[in-house]
């Protein structure tokens, strides 16, 4: 017979983080820890500042969503929810013009769950409130493990609540293509575990985070050249590009791909690109396009992640 241990919940969060501002917030802001929260929320979070100024106050974490212009604030509370923190949350959201508001707490009281639900039902569809509980567990004498549990989230967060409007036929086609790609790609288990689903874009590009604030994956559909591209987009870090370029032979061998390495010295960003010729007008071929993008995106994330 196999001997099994019991899973024990640690009720006092301060056994792991004695001080909210000095211990928990810096811990959460670390890349490997913020990625745990990002996975739970279904977002790609890049931390911009901790203890970010809002008038005479400070929001615990100010962040952004990788590849979009959505601003994120995260307010931490290692105790049960209270009116004071709810008020701060609204103040910080206003001061930072936040699109995504996250309240992390030990326990969500029923009246505050109802308040967050009400806010999600009565604010613009582009604004989203998350209420999330912090859980600590151990097995036997193991080190504690953290789990975030969402108790309130925006309605239909990963879907378009209202029908998108377009000013050109090109925008409509690009939107249809990205919507079809996401519907197809997120049926792939490995892909869905590696990337977060966002709203389809009406632009020629869509961005996907890889758990790094330094770079992200960008997929592009260039109709005038009948070309697809997938690239690692490195923002304002030429040293990172050069360090990767120095290992290009090893990286290309591991990825099984031949990249176009573009440092772009006169621009802020650098790009590492793979391209494919396609026919966008033939929708019967879209599944073939999508299979190629899935394979390339997974290869780029798997390969480059270890060098970042």
Image (tube, rainbow, N blue to C red):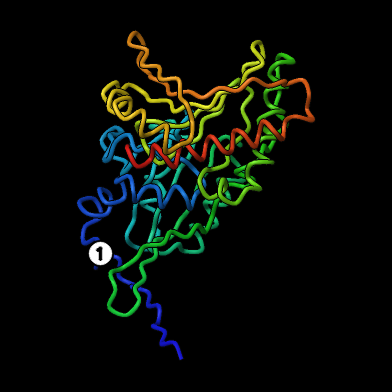
Residue closest to the eye, 215 or 94: 215
Image location (x, y in percent) of residue 18: 21, 62
- Where is 7 relative to 35, above or below? below
Residue at 27% across, 34% down: 53
How many marks are shown on the rendered structure?
1
Q: Is residue 183 left or right of residue 134?
A: right
Q: Provide residue 300's location: percent of width, then percent of height.
A: 46, 35
Q: Secondary structure at mark 1?
A: loop
Q: Which quadrant holds residue 80?
A: bottom left
Q: Residue at x 41, y 87 (%)?
A: 3
Task: Locate residue 79, reporting x and y percent.
Answer: 33, 62
Q: Nearer the viewer, residue 108 or 199?
A: 199
Q: Quadrant of residue 78?
A: bottom left
Q: Left of 116 or right of it: where is 93?
A: left
Give the quarter of the figure containing the C terminus.
Answer: top left
Q: Is residue 245 left or right of residue 153?
A: left
Residue found at the very far bottom of the displayed protein: 1
Residue 92 in view in this figure: no
Say if 34 sits above or below 225 in the image. Answer: below
* Residue 6 or residue 250, whichever sits in front: 250
Residue 199 or residue 140, whichever sits in front: 140
- What residue is rendered at 50% in x and 46% in y? 194
Task: Judge the density around disc 1: few (<14), some (14-19), many (≥20) Cα neighbours within 10 Å.
Answer: some
Quick check: 243 above or below 19? above
Residue wearing tag 1 = 16
Q: Where residue 106 appears, x then y in whole percent?
A: 38, 63
Can residue 245 be seen in the rendering of this structure? yes
């Amino acid at each position: 017979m196999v001997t099994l241990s019991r899973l024990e919940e640690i009720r006092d969060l301060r056994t792991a983080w004695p001080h909210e501002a000095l211990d928990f917030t810096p811990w959460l802001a670390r890349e490997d820890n913020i990625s745990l929260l990002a996975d739970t929320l279904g977002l790609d979070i890049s931390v911009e500042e901790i203890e970010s100024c809002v008038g005479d106050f400070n929001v615990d974490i100010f962040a952004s969503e990788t590849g979009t212009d959505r601003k994120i604030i995260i307010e931490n509370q290692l105790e049960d929810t209270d009116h004071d923190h709810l008020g701060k949350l609204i103040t910080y959201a206003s001061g930072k013009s936040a699109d995504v508001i996250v309240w992390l707490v030990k326990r969500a009281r029923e009246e505050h769950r109802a308040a967050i639900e009400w806010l999600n039902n009565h604010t613009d569809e582009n604004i989203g409130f998350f209420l999330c509980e912090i859980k600590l567990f151990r097995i036997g004498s193991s080190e504690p493990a953290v789990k975030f549990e969402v108790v309130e989230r925006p309605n239909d967060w990963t879907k378009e609540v209202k029908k998108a409007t377009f000013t050109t036929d090109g925008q409509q086609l690009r939107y249809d293509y990205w919507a079809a790609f996401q519907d197809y790609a997120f049926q792939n288990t490995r892909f869905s575990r590696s990337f977060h689903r966002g709203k389809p874009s009406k632009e020629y590009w869509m961005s996907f985070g890889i758990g790094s604030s330094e770079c992200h994956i960008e997929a592009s559909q260039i109709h005038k050249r009948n070309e697809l591209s997938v690239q690692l987009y490195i923002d304002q870090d030429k040293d990172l590009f050069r360090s990767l370029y120095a290992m290009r032979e090893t990286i290309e061998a591991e990825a099984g791909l031949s990249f176009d390495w573009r440092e772009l010295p006169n621009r802020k960003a650098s790009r590492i690109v793979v391209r494919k010729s396609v026919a966008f007008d033939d929708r019967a071929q879209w599944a073939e396009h999508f299979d190629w993008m899935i394979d390339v995106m997974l290869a780029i994330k798997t390969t480059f992640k270890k060098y970042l």
